[in-house]
Amino acid sequence: MDGFAAVDFEFARQVLQRGIALLYVVAFASTLNQFRPLLGEHGLLPATELLEWVRTSPRGRRMLRPTLFRFTRYTDRRLAALCWAAMLLAAVLVCGIPQLVSPWLTMACFLALWLGYMSIVSIGQTFYGFGWEMLLLEAGFLAAFLGSDAEPPATVVVVLFWWLVFRLEFGAGMIKIRGGREWRDLTALTFHHETQPMPGPLSRQAHLLPRWFHQGEVLGNHFAQLVAPWFLFAPLLGLFVPGPWPAVVGAAAAAVVIATQLWLIVTGNFAWLNWATVVLAFSAIGLPGIGSPSRAPANDPPWLVDGMPLPWLLATCAVGVLLLVLSWAPLQNLFAHRQLMNASFNRWQLANAYGAFGTVTRERIEIVVEGTMDEDPDAASWREYGFRGKPGEVRRIPRQFAPYHLRLDWLMWFLPLGRSLDDWFTVFLVRLLQADAATLRLLARDPFGGERPRWVRAVAYRYRFTTRAEFRRSRDRWLRERRGLVLGPLSLR
């Protein structure tokens, strides 16, 4: 740190700008492929109906967050155009081209991504109700003020990234301590690998590890989320304490966060949550001598302060003041008895509260969707629809999709968790009865090859990973037990 300039954090800036831009490419690609069948003009929860309600309802106008579609009529074609333009802009940022020109151009590019994705999240309803949506928005807003390659990153912006990682990690840790008993008696990871929303290729192997290993996982998680985040701010001591140790402590804390996130990436599919946390944690890794050359601040011309143009310095300081004011509510929330998880305290989704898995489910219930061509549903032969990510066929190895986000599969995981069946699920079954091509493209397998089934139904099964001995006998990776009919049989008649 060198006063207003974080001269040792040029490498961190490069990782942040390019990594966040790459995550925007993934997010807009996920939207391009899935928004229209889920939320488009003929989607399960049409965004057009939400916008019409907003247009005719004072309450709706107050509730809707900022979106470009409030001022221009939503169409699927406009949604696709926004996604393609945003992916191109994000790819240019990944290549570092705007960063070669001007901090103001870089700022404009990131703010365009932020506003474009907020326009989608604001009308995304339950399919965009995940904590990593607001995390990407907040990260994109902060990345807009990291500047260009011509000047060092501003200290205040780098510190704001540390504050974001702190809220993300410490908030998640406090949610767990206040949540289920399994986090306090160290048994949470005994169940988590099996019951998490969307297991990955190595989730079963992780689940079968010894109990003492799972207890160590929980202890490691508590250390990474409750202890390490405090040391992310250690490089600030470098302003007052000479020597490399403040930077080393901050980098070590970041390394702990990154290591735990990499383990979660290997053993699960949490969209871009873990990938974003890894990218953001690099903000605390300062590498002296890499990036911005050493300078003599006393020789700066009047329009430069610590190597930064004065207008740019004032802009970053204004952002710091804004985020400082907005951070009061999330700071209180971190230490509140009734801590909120994944909550936004303002319309622009800045300075949010984060957290995940305050409780861990102990058994996995899956909703399996089946259809038949037979006339009589009571004597029918039923065939199962295959989803891309969620468990279904018992021999299939779970695939790795993250950082790509399979929204339908994630929402299917929430259905059996004690809630009534959501409206979108009934519409989903109707789309299957209609053999709607856009809906079927969300699935991995249509057992009827594009033809309309006569009946569909939803059945609950309990899934668990097979033991090593069970796998050797059957070659099945899952063992499932039928629990009962959830909905149906339904037909278009």
Image (cartoon, helix red, strand yellow):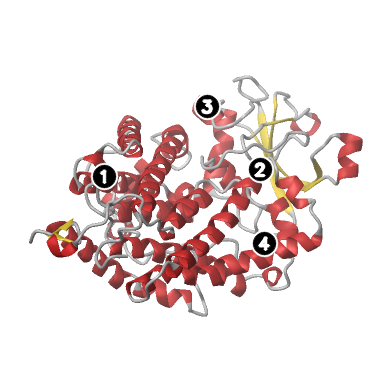
Q: Quadrant of residue 360?
A: bottom right
Q: Nearer the viewer, residue 126 or 265?
A: 265
Residue located beneath label 2 in the image = 200
- Estimate the spatial distance between the alpha carbons at disc 3 and disc 1, rounded to whole Å: 34 Å
Please tell me whether residue 477 is drawn above or below residue 158 in the rendered image: above
Mark 4 burial class by Cα count in 10 Å: few <14, some 14-19, many 20+: many
Mark 1 burial class by Cα count in 10 Å: few <14, some 14-19, many 20+: some
Residue 84 spot, x, y in % from top left: 34, 31
Q: Nearer the viewer, residue 79 or 319?
A: 319
Please tell me whether residue 124 is drawn above or below residue 40 in the rendered image: below
State the residue at coordinates (68%, 38%): 398
- Element assignment for label 2: loop
Position of 258 with respect to 374 (left or right) is left
Residue 129 visible in the snapshot: no
The label shown at residue 112 is: 1
Task: Give the amino acid type for the residue marked by disc 4 in the picture.
Answer: Val
Q: Nearer the viewer, mark 4 or mark 1?
A: 1
Q: Quadrant of residue 294?
A: bottom left
Give the mark nearer the N terminus: 3 vs 1: 1
Mark 3 burial class by Cα count in 10 Å: few <14, some 14-19, many 20+: some
- Element assignment for label 3: loop
Residue located beneath label 3 in the image = 436
Residue located beneath label 4 in the image = 360
Residue 477 spot, x, y in % from top left: 79, 39
Give the mark nearer the N terminus: 3 vs 4: 4
- Estimate the spatial distance between the alpha carbons at disc 2 and disc 3, rounded to whole Å: 29 Å
- CB under 8 Å between discs 3 and 1: no
Give the mark nearer the N terminus: 4 vs 1: 1
Task: Give the amino acid type for the residue marked by disc 1 in the picture.
Answer: Ala
Q: Nearer the viewer, mark 2 or mark 3?
A: 2
